[in-house]
Amino acid sequence: MKIKTLIIDDEKLSRELIRSFLIKYPQIAIIDEAVDGFDALQKINSLNPDLLILDIQMPKINGFELLQVIEKEVLIVFITAYDEYALQAFENNAIDYLLKPFSEIRFEKAINKVIDIFTNKNNQEPAIPTLKILQQIKTDRIVVKTGANIDVVLIEDIVYIESLGDYSVIYTATKKIIKQKPLKEFADMLDDRLFIRTHKSFIVNSKYIIKIEKFTKDSYISVLSTNVKVPVSKAGYKELRDKLDF
């Protein structure tokens, strides 16, 4: 079986260079190219690639944000002009990370890794995980796919998040969005100086809290500026006191 490969890069010259390197490998089948994250998502869903040669810095949504909405198992080789993303790339289980401009010899090393892993996978031998989104990386926005639509939510616009088991509901002042991610993973990725786990089922953006009211002997209610009341457990109240210093 050939490795179905999608090249994702907003720079035409970069895509052409990668294509010229890849055509030398009989194991690789280049199925298409994509110029940004939205274009890539559509092609991933329709073409079902095995491998993404993925740029990180792109218009609309970047490479890491694209991974948040991919529902398929896929191998990743990151390419970028910025070396500060290396740790995040490997923690996303990238096969390799190529810093532009890279040589053909360096590219060959990455593709040989891919071929070895793909061969082991098809032979049912143990291989490294193909795609696991790293949840604890701090970010300034969240990408959510709903049907054919993609919403990009700025972290600062999140008022609170409510748990629905393996899903979470993200509330802003104007809308709510459901994302398939448990609340604990949001707790790991959000800045805990601003976002407080007030209850086992709620995370609240503290800048929207205007009042905390007593509810029962061991629980409280946080009143938000959007006229919403969110429960506060005993542990959540202690967290609020420590973070808000009252």
Image (cartoon, helix red, strand yellow):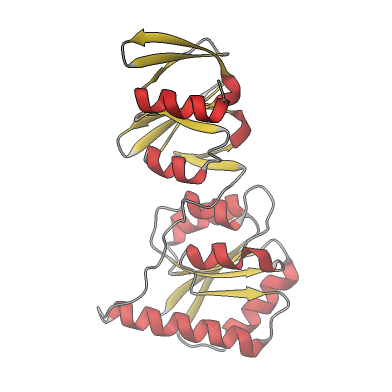
**Residue 61 sits above or below residue 94 on the image:** above
Tally the numbered discs.
0
Q: Position of residue 235 (x, y in %)?
A: 37, 28
Q: Quadrant of residue 154?
A: top right
Q: Between residues 207 and 148, which one lies in front from this camera angle?
A: 207
In the picture, the quarter occupied by the C terminus is top right
Task: Locate residue 220 relative to residue 57 in the image: left or right.
Answer: left
Residue sitting at 65 percent across and 87 percent down? 104
Q: Give percent across and percent down for residue 85.
A: 62, 63
Relative to residue 38, is residue 103 drawn left or right?
A: right
**Which residue extends farthest left?**
124
* Residue 180, visible in the rendered structure: no
Looking at the picture, tell me which residue is in the foreground, 107 or 136. 136
The structure residue drawn at horizontal position 48% and vertical position 62%, both measured from the top left corner, is 92
Image location (x, y in percent) of residue 225: 58, 13
Say which quarter of the image contains residue 57. bottom right
